[in-house]
Image: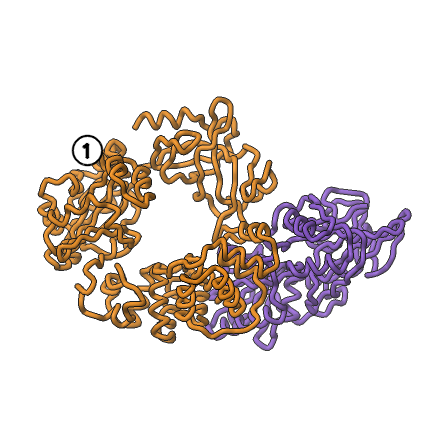
Chain colours: A purple, B orange
């Protein structure tokens, strides 16, 4: 039994469908019913996937497993493990702020917490979602008045839909890149209701998307595909955009610090709310966040994983 | 401050020069005149003096953010910018403020005489009034590190548009010593009194690197060639029996070079010469590193003067008998320069011409550059005027190919600014008696994609962390290029390189095949 394993195993518990968590090659998969369709689609799986509802308890050899909302993307989960009265919680990726799309994060009490720390430094403090979307709408409106197309790069699964449900649709039509369209077809087929979008195809022309917003995955940046939107303003929606150096390096006109991960304050809040006496820190600024917790009287350790590399998504 | 923050954001958000100029023009139309003047001062690198140490600022911000200082420092290594780190860790402001740019600069300057405790109260209070870009800019001003991605040329262009004046005239007006305390913007740009500031230098004309075949420049007879000397570009001004020496960084350095005092007697009143501040001893130039030692000294002692004497290697005459000669042709200016430098002097040297009948001959001369301890050849069009800034066409620098050596990466540190949070600053080693001996650092030369790849590799091949420094597995080999090499007692390797940079990543080469120290030592001996 492994959590988000990256080497092939017999039985894998998968918190959500992002590619750094859901790897191919396992014999059997266990995930939430909401996360399953995307995982099946992305990894090309059929009957190897077993699903559970949020909160459903599953007993395997004296150990009780359950999946709980992590608020990261639709269907994303924290995994709670209970054995002989001891409770462990693995947060997976999470955020505390409600994004209007994913089932909100559920605080769980536990003895041992394994938390991510992607943004585990005090320089990462998000603005509220409503402030960020006010900025995005202002940028879109200003581009429209200058006759520019607004191109916004965001992760295809989760972030793109979060933008879609929160952006001001009275400003114009929203067009999407094929990679985002594919994800949204899967989500729509499982009953998730999303605002209407149009797919950018080889046939679409400038008059189609005039004054509109184009959503594309970060991988489309710098590709020839993006050139057809000239003249355009390019923005990236990512937590990493909160640093000026990263914004300038990525060569975008604007960076919106919109993240599906917990910021510094949320990480601390999650640790506090769990009541855990022991914390393992993974994925991110592990060493720093563990030391910070230790100094505040928490028994904390740096858990080494393959996630040493900070992905700029 | 809000309007200035808006300008900063607009300049920061675009790389297109046209958009930068229009942002500046809009600013000059809308901002208060007091603020405009300070904006021009800041954009031309005239910053208010620092009145609080950065260590104190870090301490006060950490305290206000309720985090330990080590966590502040870890954050700083990731952000790569002190002002930004301060702005980001601080809690949200509790009230708002409407002070102008000028008010905040006055606020910062008023801190100077205060006791530390009083400074702390005021600064922490200011932080609680400022959010976002305004807080970041306040920190940039108070740490004395204000910079923005806009060249002086663009500022001049925007001001010229705003005041309907000639850009080259304005570029000259903005040079030299002026302060927002003693002038107004109108006075600065429009007073038609050139002698109001006797020390005012002219904008330097800068050469472009020659990357094409020199034959594409046409007839060799239209060109003048000189050696490219390796010192500090400078301007010598003699007006009203007073001497002023400016370096290219628009720094007044008269007192640093007492040797030049004799120029008051050698040059007639109303003379401005362009040339090189060149360390020179026993009839030949010394390396740039020796000049660096002299620049670093606070006091120019007789000892350092005798160890590293300087001459002024004259290139050009910009003003003669109080008249601006810049529009005259180079051949005419050169004739005048030769007359001015005709007096025998151990300090004033005339940059000799390199005669050449064909481009092939000049190519030969270029290869001999190192025997003259020069960096290459300068090419100037004989009928050209003296322009301002870096403009293509009339002046070219044709540098010699650098030395190269294959070295192994042994340490890495995160970069700053645009390279923040990426490992971009590396230390390299060569083999010496079976061990890797670090001998240089290098920062530039890799593409963004290569930097990202090396960064990932470093994070997965770290051997040890010492604060911000990581030692890495000695596996990656890079070709390091450099322009010069000198003995150094300050480095364990015994050598110091001039302008080391990464030439290319030798993915084909295993670490065992990197160069040995003896290779570098041989280069030293060849000199």
A280 to B10, vertically: above or below: above
Q: Position of residue B269 (x, y in %)?
A: 11, 55
Left or right position of A133 against B393: right
B53 to B293, vertically: above or below: below
Q: Can you see residue B357?
A: no
Taking depth in this image into account, of B416 and A227 the one nearest to the observer is B416
Report the residue at 52% width, 70% height from top: B129
Left or right position of B213 against B423: left
Query: On the rendered image, what quadrant is the N terminus of chain B found in?
Result: bottom left
Taking depth in this image into account, of B415 and A212 the one nearest to the observer is B415
Residue highlighted by disc 1: B283
Q: Can you see residue A261?
A: yes
Taking depth in this image into account, of B341 and B163 the one nearest to the observer is B341
Q: Position of residue B347 (x, y in %)?
A: 17, 41
Q: Position of residue B338 (x, y in %)?
A: 11, 45
Q: Position of residue B404 (x, y in %)?
A: 39, 33
Left or right position of B151 against A53: left
Taking depth in this image into account, of B483 and A250 the one nearest to the observer is B483
Number of numbered markers? 1
Name of the residue lying farthest toward the bottom: A170
Please rate how many residues cluster around mark 1, counting C-alpha atoms within 10 Å: few if below 14, some from 14 to 19, many from 20.
Answer: few
**Disc 1: host chain:** B
Left or right position of A218 against B324: right
Label 1: which secondary element? loop
Query: On the rendered image, what quadrant is the C terminus of chain B found in?
Result: top left
B120 to A61, vertically: above or below: below
Report the residue at 36% width, 63% height from top: B42
């Amino acid at each position: 039994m492994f959590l988000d394993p990256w080497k092939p195993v017999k039985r894998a518990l998968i918190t959500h469908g992002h590619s750094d968590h859901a790897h191919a090659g396992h014999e059997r998969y266990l995930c939430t019913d909401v996360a399953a369709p995307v995982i099946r689609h992305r990894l090309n799986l059929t009957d190897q996937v077993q699903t559970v509802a949020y909160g459903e308890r599953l007993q395997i050899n004296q150990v009780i497993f359950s999946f709980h909302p992590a608020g990261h993307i639709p269907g994303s989960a924290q995994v709670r493990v209970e054995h002989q009265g001891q409770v462990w919680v693995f947060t997976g990726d999470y955020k505390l702020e409600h994004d209007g799309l994913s089932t909100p994060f559920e605080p769980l009490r536990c003895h041992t917490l394994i938390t991510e720390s992607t943004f585990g430094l005090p320089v990462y403090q998000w603005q509220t979602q409503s402030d960020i979307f006010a900025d995005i709408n202002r940028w879109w409106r200003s581009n429209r008045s200058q006759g520019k197309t607004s191109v916004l790069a965001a992760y295809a699964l989760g972030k793109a839909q979060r933008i879609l449900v929160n952006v001001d649709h009275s400003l114009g039509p929203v067009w999407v890149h094929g990679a985002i369209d594919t994800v949204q077809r899967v989500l729509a087929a499982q009953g998730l209701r999303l605002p209407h979008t149009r797919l950018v195809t080889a046939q679409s022309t400038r008059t189609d998307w005039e004054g509109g917003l184009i959503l594309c995955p970060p991988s489309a940046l710098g590709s020839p595909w993006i050139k057809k939107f000239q003249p355009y303003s390019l923005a990236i929606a990512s937590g990493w955009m909160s640093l000026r150096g990263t914004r300038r390096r990525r060569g975008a006109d604007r960076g919106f610090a919109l993240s599906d991960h917990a910021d510094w304050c949320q990480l601390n809040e999650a640790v506090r709310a769990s009541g855990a006496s022991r914390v393992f820190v993974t994925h991110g600024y592990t060493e720093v966040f563990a030391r910070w917790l230790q100094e505040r009287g928490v028994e904390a350790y740096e858990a080494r994983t393959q996630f040493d590399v900070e992905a700029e998504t | 401050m809000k309007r200035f923050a808006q300008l900063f954001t607009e300049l920061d958000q675009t790389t297109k020069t046209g958009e930068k100029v229009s942002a500046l023009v809009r600013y000059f139309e809308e901002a208060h005149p007091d603020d405009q003047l300070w904006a021009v001062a800041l954009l031309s690198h005239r910053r208010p003096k620092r009145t609080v140490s950065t260590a104190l600022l870090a301490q006060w911000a950490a305290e206000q953010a309720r985090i330990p200082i080590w966590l502040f420092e870890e954050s700083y290594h990731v952000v790569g910018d002190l002002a930004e780190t301060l702005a980001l860790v601080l809690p949200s402001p509790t009230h708002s403020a409407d002070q102008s740019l000028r008010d905040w600069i006055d606020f910062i300057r008023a801190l100077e005489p205060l006791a530390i405790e009083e400074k702390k109260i005021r600064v922490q209070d200011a932080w609680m009034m400022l959010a976002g870009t305004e807080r970041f800019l306040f920190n940039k001003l108070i740490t004395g590190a204000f910079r923005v991605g806009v060249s002086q040329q663009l500022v001049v262009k925007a001001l010229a548009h705003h005041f309907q004046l000639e850009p080259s005239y304005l570029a000259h007006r903005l040079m030299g010593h002026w302060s927002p305390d003693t002038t107004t913007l109108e006075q600065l740009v429009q007073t038609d009194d050139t002698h109001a500031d006797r020390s005012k230098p002219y904008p330097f004309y800068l050469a472009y690197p020659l990357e094409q075949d020199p034959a594409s420049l046409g007839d060799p007879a239209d060109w003048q060639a000189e050696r490219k000397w390796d010192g500090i570009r400078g301007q010598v001004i003699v007006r009203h029996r007073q001497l002023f020496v400016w370096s290219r960084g628009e720094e007044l350095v008269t007192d640093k070079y007492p040797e030049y005092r004799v120029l008051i007697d050698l040059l007639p009143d109303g003379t401005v010469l362009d040339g090189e501040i060149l360390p020179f001893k026993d009839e030949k130039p010394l390396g740039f590193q020796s000049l660096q030692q002299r620049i670093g000294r606070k006091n120019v002692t007789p000892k350092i003067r005798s160890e590293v004497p300087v001459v002024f290697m004259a290139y050009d005459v910009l003003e003669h008998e109080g008249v601006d000669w810049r529009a005259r042709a180079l051949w005419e200016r050169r004739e005048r320069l030769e007359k001015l430098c005709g007096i025998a002097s151990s300090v004033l040297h005339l940059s000799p011409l390199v005669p050449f009948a064909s481009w092939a001959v000049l190519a030969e001369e270029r290869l001999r550059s190192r025997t003259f301890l020069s960096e290459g050849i300068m090419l100037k069009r004989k009928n050209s005027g003296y322009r301002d800034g870096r403009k293509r066409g009339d002046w070219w620098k044709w540098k010699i190919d650098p030395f190269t050596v294959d070295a192994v990466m042994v340490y890495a540190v995160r970069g700053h600014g645009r390279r923040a949070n990426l490992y971009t600053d590396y230390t390299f080693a060569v083999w010496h008696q079976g061990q890797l001996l670090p001998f240089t650092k290098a920062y530039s030369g890799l593409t963004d994609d290569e930097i990202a790849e090396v960064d990932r590799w470093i994070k997965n091949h770290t051997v040890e962390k010492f604060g911000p420094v990581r030692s890495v597995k000695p596996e990656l080999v890079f070709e390091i290029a450099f322009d010069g090499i000198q003995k150094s007692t300050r480095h364990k390797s015994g050598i110091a390189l001039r302008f080391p940079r990464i030439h290319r990543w030798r993915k084909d080469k295993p670490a065992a095949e990197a160069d040995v120290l003896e290779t570098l030592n041989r280069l030293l001996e060849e000199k």
